[in-house]
Image (tube, coloured by chain):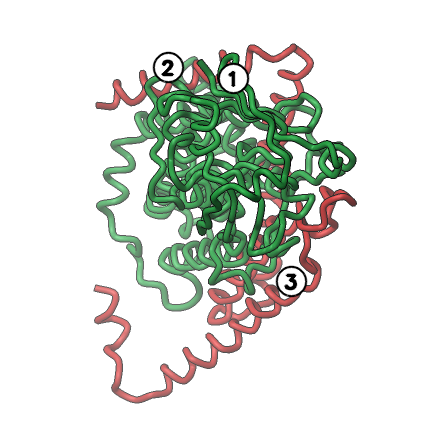
Chain colours: A green, B red
Amino acid sequence: MKTASLRGTAVTARVGLALGVAVSVCFVTGLISHFIQHPQPWFFWPTRPVWLYRVTQGLHVISGIAAIPLIIVKLWSVWPKLFERPIIGGLVRQIERVSILVLVGSMLFQLSTGLMNIAQWYAFKFFFTTSHYAMAYVAAGAVLVHIGVKLPVIRRALGEPIDEVPAADGPTRRTVLRGTWLAVALATVVTAGQTVPLLRKVSVLAPRSGQGPQGVPINRSAIAAGVLRSARSPDYRLTVTNGSTTRAFSLADLQAMKQATHRLPIACVEGWSVEAEWTGVVLADLVAAVGGQRDSDVRMISLEPPGPYSRTVLPARHARDDKTLIALKLNGQPLDLDHGYPCRLIAPTRPGVLQTKWLSRIEVVP
Amino acid sequence: MRVILVALGVLIGAYGAVLLWENPPVIIMRILVWAVVGVVLHDLVFAPLCVALGFAARRLVPGKWWPPIAVAAFCSVVLAFLAVPVYGRPGMRPDNMTVLDRNYPLGLWISLAAVWACVPLYLSWTYWRASRPHTSPPDSARSR
């Protein structure tokens, strides 16, 4: 059987359907992550189950990686169309070609920049988060247009049997599909271990092994944050304010307060996550110590010099949650400097980048 | 239905274009170049290379061996793509040893070896199945 007949709408539509599912999961989970980081009044993000963000962001990266073999096969199955005549044609033909260019270009942009970002390889000279976010809408729009245009073809192709001609020898369209699903499974297995503990050992191409100081990887080191001296200073105080009420806590003061221990995952926007045991002061207790209200948002400010992630606002729902801690210990030991010593925020269902480390100030937002 | 899909798609895509437009011109150019270079690399380098390799391999490989070899070759391509950002650890920083902390060359070669080891296993299995008398329905019955 010739390759020419292996290609065909029966394969394209089925692989396209799987690609559509992967891209949809990737788009929705990406939007969730975006709106947690850039909250909108209409956006609701719960505090339970505590592993919710771990799952959504894990799925974001897993579905993106699964889309790589799918898009390779999808493009393979339609590649000869690139050279179909007329090459230029009329206006409708040109519009169709441009729409496909936008579709393929935006998809390859998303997959390539996403894959590079999880390995922290910034060879492109534009800001990752904003361009990845903007291009996601371009890709999603192009996918919808493509489905709209091709809907009759897709319907017909999905109704057709895969193998019209029984093949005596060599690969069939069924082989192509099975090979595709196999490659998707393989791509998942070799990378998903950075968030799925069961796969940790076999994920040989995952950017994270899940190891790190105190059994937890880090994303921003104390050196990179420039806090080596300030975090270890004997004059260190955690200042908690509510309007004109201000209290300063030394590390010993915090240790003398009532301690709570919770198992919470730390889940990075880059798709890795691990669960750990965190011990510290319940944030709501500190807020109550300065007379803060339970329905107030709380601002977290790091010792790190001002930058995009040196301060974050924790929504009231998370701030009053009894599992939200100002952690002093990780897995039974005092926080490693790279994990945010002397104290850091750890809250359920929040991206790691918003779990502010090396806290210097907590402000109840009026 | 189709009109709604297309209209919605144009709307969402336009919103993305507006977001991209907020960048300075030099950044917009870099983003567009990255996207277009991706398409060009696929359509005019990667795809023709695959066709050429496939064409050459089909002369050398017997028909019965072709399906598992093609699947193994495709899996190897996927593994190679996934290895690009980690193999030489281009994103490694000396202050953080928890990123890119695996032996990726070893991992890639082991996974490639595992993939290709499946080819003789699969072939032996198909030969063994074909040599068993009267246990599976004939090909003509299965294809209907």
Is residue B63 positioned above or below B95 on the image?
below
Residue highlighted by disc 2:
B11
Query: Around disc 2, counting alpha carbons within 10 Å, would you say few (fewer than 14), some (14 to 19), or many (20 or more)?
Result: some
Task: Give, as a three-letter code, the residue at label 2.
Answer: Leu
Nearer-the-camera pick, A162 or A305: A305
Residue plotted at (37% across, 15% down): B11
* Residue sticking out furthest to the bottom: B133
| Image position, residue A261 (x, y; %) | 46, 50
Looking at marks 3 and 2 on the same chain, the residue that comes earlier in the sequence is marked by: 2
- In-image side of A350 versus A121 (left or right): left
Is residue A51 in view from this perspective? yes
Query: Which secondary structure lies at badge 2?
Result: helix
- Residues under labels 2 and 1: Cα distance? 49 Å
Query: Around disc 3, counting alpha carbons within 10 Å, would you say few (fewer than 14), some (14 to 19), or many (20 or more)?
Result: some
- Residues under labels 3 and 2: Cα distance? 44 Å
- Residues under labels 1 and 3: Cα distance? 56 Å
Residue highlighted by disc 1:
A245
Mark 2 and 1 residues: CB-CB less than 8 Å, in contact? no
Locate the C terminus of chain A by quadrant: top left
Query: Which secondary structure lies at badge 3?
Result: helix
| Image position, residue B68 (x, y; %) | 49, 67
